[in-house]
Amino acid sequence: MSSPPPGPALLGYHEATALVAAHAAELRRVPPPVEIVELAQAVGRILACPLAADRDQPPFARSTRDGFACRAAEASTHKPLAVAGATRAGLAPAGPLLPGTAWEIMTGAPIPSGADAVVMLEHVQAADGRVRLLPPRTVEPGENIVARGAQARAADEMLPAGTAIHSAQIALAASCGHATLPVYARPRVAILTTGDELVPVASSPAGGQIRNSNGPMLAAMVAAAGGDPWVLPTAADTPQALDAALAQALEADLLLITGGVSAGKFDLVEPALARIGARFHFTGLRIQPGKPLVFGELPTSGATSVQNENGTKCIQPGKPLVFGELPTSGATSVQNENGTKCNENGTKCFFGLPGNPVSSAVTFLLFAAPILAALAGSREPAPRFALAQMAPSPVDRGGKPGLTRFLPAFCTFSSLDGQLPQVAFVPWQGSGDLTALARSNCFLVVPEDAHSLPPGSIVRILLP
Ligand code: AMP
Ligand code: MG
């Protein structure tokens, strides 16, 4: 009961990836608008300006141990040194350290001038105000000290614009005194589900109806990828309903439409897109799941206005040298009349994702996520792949020839020392199998020409 292989006209996975990457690169030439947010609200956002050090990091030579600051050459003779004083974290640097003396010091405290090493508390004998490094141990100059400015010099760039802000970046910003951060505005992503059979999550489906699961799924995926999801009411499978819904969706920065892009009698999305002037880059790919995927551009309503970079230049929050500026040379911010972002040629991208949930998820990750990352100003590559090793797993029953496949799989990342992550197929009933999708944590990439993926072989996985 296998269907014929797809025609040669369909693009393969690699060609489609290159095409989408070229569009993403074009979108990246235009930096998104900038907002200032409280530091605590910046998690998950994209840094809009380089983050520079406000002062040397660390701001003073600091001890990495509890112990005694000393001159390495003196301590290494193993002669007792008189303890001349003590500095704990938070105190000003002491010194100068006189010859023949040591200085008690705590982790994070500034090194007294004249000292060039710290001997650890555990490595000394201390009694009667004197301390001696226990032989045969010796100490080298610089040991247990982080020099002033070792991590960054004042005004050095520590993070480039486009960095995704997680807990570590928040900590670094806090250490440089930023109560607020400039971040790129999130692109607004319209999510338009289509299909007469769909009812909202809270409704009880009548016979033949199903709940709309793609809407909530894609909203979660868009938010995780740095977009601002805008879930529209589901459109019925009629030209009138689709025309009205698309007219509304055009207000977004990116359009994701699900369902209605296959070859069925009620798959009316492509003609509706064509009616509003869509240019199709591809309508179908040699992949599984996700073969019916559609990608293209729509003309944006009205005239476009091209602002120069001053319109979106980052705001200096009152601290000189802390933030750089967005590049000004030739960079332009392009918006259409209603303020949404569009390409320099005044178009905006859309994807017609297949309605089947696994197909929607896979095609979003592979193709919509890179476009969304570009619109969001993120430097992080999308999609993300990793290598893993095939575990003994239920046999994949094979698929249609000539298709690159992305099959729901579960990868165990906590594998034994020296062992690659182990990945196994999740048994699935095809691209409508939401249970398999929810039981998976990655997709196993089966290349077009792969006949089998034997246990132990090294394979690529697509990460969510
Ligand atoms: P289509 O791409 O419209 O032919 O739909 C393919 C399959 O996906 C059909 O079984 C649809 O019922 C299902 N489907 C379409 N849209 C959704 C949705 N939003 N949520 C869940 N399933 C969907
Ligand atoms: Mg449909």
Image (tube, rainbow, N blue to C red):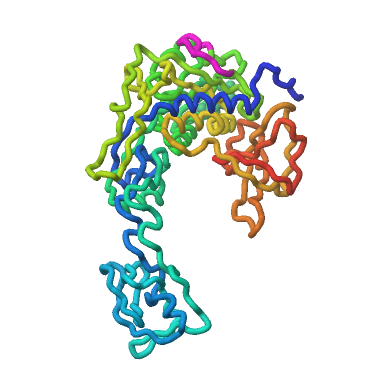
Expressed as whole percent of the image width and height from the top left, the position of residue 462 reads 59, 39
Asked whether 259 or 110 is in front, the reply is 110
Q: Residue furthest toward the bottom? A: 128
Query: Vertical placement of 247 versus 131: above or below?
Result: above
Q: Residue furthest toward the left? A: 318
Expressed as whole percent of the image width and height from the top left, the position of residue 410 reads 62, 45
* Quadrant in the picture for the C terminus: top right
Q: Residue at x 37, y 20 (%)?
A: 251
Query: Vertical placement of 12 versus 388: above or below?
Result: above
Expressed as whole percent of the image width and height from the top left, the position of residue 434 reads 58, 36
Asked whether 461 or 230 is in front, the reply is 461
Q: Residue at x 29, y 48 (%)?
A: 178
How many marks can you see? 0
Residue 201 visible in the current orientation:
no
**Quarter location, residue 188:** top left
Q: Which residues are magenta?
A: 271-282
Asked whether 284 or 382 is in front, the reply is 382
Asked whether 293 or 209 is in front, the reply is 293
* Quadrant in the picture for the N terminus: top right
Residue 380 visible in the current orientation:
yes
**Quarter location, residue 260:** top right
Q: Residue at x 44, y 70 (%)?
A: 141
Using residue 75 as the reference point, say whether residue 403 is left or right of it.
right
Using residue 401 as the reference point, say whether residue 153 is left or right of it.
left
Using residue 56 as the reference point, say whether residue 189 is left or right of it.
right
**Quarter location, residue 103:** bottom left
Expressed as whole percent of the image width and height from the top left, the position of residue 334 reads 36, 21
Q: Is residue 174 magenta?
A: no
Q: Residue at x 63, y 23 (%)?
A: 285
